[in-house]
Amino acid sequence: MKLQRNGRTKALAIGAVALVSSLSLAACGSDNNTTASTSPASGGSSAAAISCASKQASLMGAGSTAQGNAVDVWKAAYGTACSGTQISYNGVGSGAGVAQFNQGKVAFAGTDFALKSTDVDASKQVCTGGGQAIDLPMVAGLVSIVFNVQGVDHLTLDGPTTAKIFDGQITTWNDPAIATLNPGVTLPSAPIQTFHRSDDSGTTYNLTSYFAKTSGGAWTAPASKTWAGKGGQSANGSAGVSAQIKQVPNSIGYVELSYAQNNSLKSASIKTGASKPVDPTAANAAITLGNSTVVGTGNDLALQLDYGTSAENAYPIVLVTYEIACDKGNKADTLDSLKSFFNYMASDSGQQAIASKGYVPMPSAISTKVKAAIGNLS
C-alpha cells in the first residue's frame, strides 16, 4: 500500500528480535523529561514518569476507536499526575476525528490511516501562521479477524478467502475454500453472518488494504475507510462489532487485538505464504511493523506497511494510529499540555503501559522521530 505522501526516507532498520523482546520488558521506563510526579498507569503494573506542562490546560481529542483502550490508560495516568489537565477523548472513528480537527473542535485527533492531501489542505485553515496537520505514529496494533463459530476453537484464513467471506461470495462455514484451509476441523453448514463497521474507520481501511494486496482480485473495491463490501450487517465502532460477534452465533468480524482480548473473542490465524499460518499476536505484528518505511516528509511521519508480507511469523494485518496535530499554529492555551501529554504517550513508560492491552510498543527508531517532532510543535 502506498500512503498519500511524497518522498521516502530509508527503511527503518529495526530487528524483529529487538521488537519482540521489547514486549516482554517490565512495563516501566523513563524518558528524558524532568519527572514531575509518579503515578500508576491504569491497567498496568508500571509507574509512569510524567512531566506536566508548565501551563496546564484541558485537552479534547477525538477519532480512532482502535486507540481507545490505549488513551484510557494514558489519560488516567496523566490525569493523576497532572491534576490541572483534564483530557477527554471521543472515539467517533478516524474519519470523524479528522473532520472535527479540521473544524477546530479538538486539539488533536486519532486516525488509523495517514492524512490525505485534501485533509492537509483543510487543516491550514485551523493551523495558523502557515502551519498544517502532521501524522505522528503513536499507537501500533493489529486487526484481528474475530469469529464465533459453533464448535470451532481455531480457524485459519487467507487473503482471498477472507475477502470473499466479507464480500458475500462465500456464505456458509463449510464452504470448500474454508475447509481446505482447516483440515481436521468440523465446520458447521450454518450461514455466515458478517459484521463490518458502519462508521468511516481506519480499521476498515487497514483491512481493505490487506484485501487489495492479497485477495487476488476477489476484493474489487479500493482500500477505503468506508465499507464497500456486499451484504453483512454493520455496527458502530470496534466496541459495537465486538459486541455483535460475542452475541451472534456463526458470525465473523474485524476489530483491533485489544478489543478481541477484552471481549474474550477468538481470532483467526492467517496463511501468508510463510511456512505456517501466523497467529494474531503483538509479537508477530511487531515483525511487520519493524519493516515499515517512513514516507512522510519533514515532521510528518506517515508510514508504509507491507500488508502482503510472507516473512516468517509476520502478521500481515497491522495498523498504526496517528495523532494529528498542527506542526505550527496550535492554540497557545493548550500547546504546552498537548506537548506534555504527547511526550508521555511516546515515552518508553507510556508505550509499555499499553502493551498489556494488546498494543505493540513503538520501535525506538520510530518513537525517537516522534519525540523530535513533538519537540518542534509550536
Image: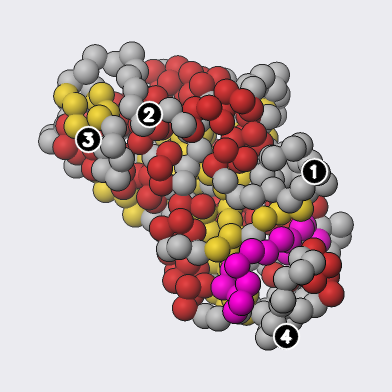
Give the magenta range.
Answer: 147-162
**Mark 3 closeness class: few <14, some 14–19, many ≥20 residues within 10 Å:** some
Q: Earlier in the sequence, mark 1 or mark 3?
A: 3
Q: Earlier in the sequence, mark 1 or mark 4?
A: 4
Q: Which is nearer the eye, 376 or 319? A: 319
Does 155 appear in magenta? yes
**Mark 1 closeness class: few <14, some 14–19, many ≥20 residues within 10 Å:** some
Distance Cα–Cα, label 2 vs label 3: 13 Å
Query: Which residue type does callout 4 highlight?
Result: Ser
For residue 274, the mark is 1
Find the residue positioned furthest to the right: 216
Instruction: Indicate which label's residue lies in the foreground, 2 or 3.
Output: 2
Secondary structure found at label 2: loop
Please determine whether, in this image, residue 307 is positioned above or below residue 135.
below
Secondary structure found at label 1: loop
For label 4, the residue is 189
Q: Earlier in the sequence, mark 3 or mark 4?
A: 3
Distance Cα–Cα, label 1 vs label 2: 31 Å
Residue at image x 40%, y 42%? 356
Where residue 144 appears, as percent x and y from the top left, is 58, 56
Q: Which is nearer the eye, 183 or 87? A: 183
Q: Is residue 334 left or right of residue 280?
A: left
For the residues labelled 2 and 3, say whether their Cβ atoms are less than 8 Å apart. no
Distance Cα–Cα, label 2 vs label 4: 46 Å
For residue 26, the mark is 2
For label 3, the residue is 40
Tell me where residue 230 sits by quadrant.
bottom right
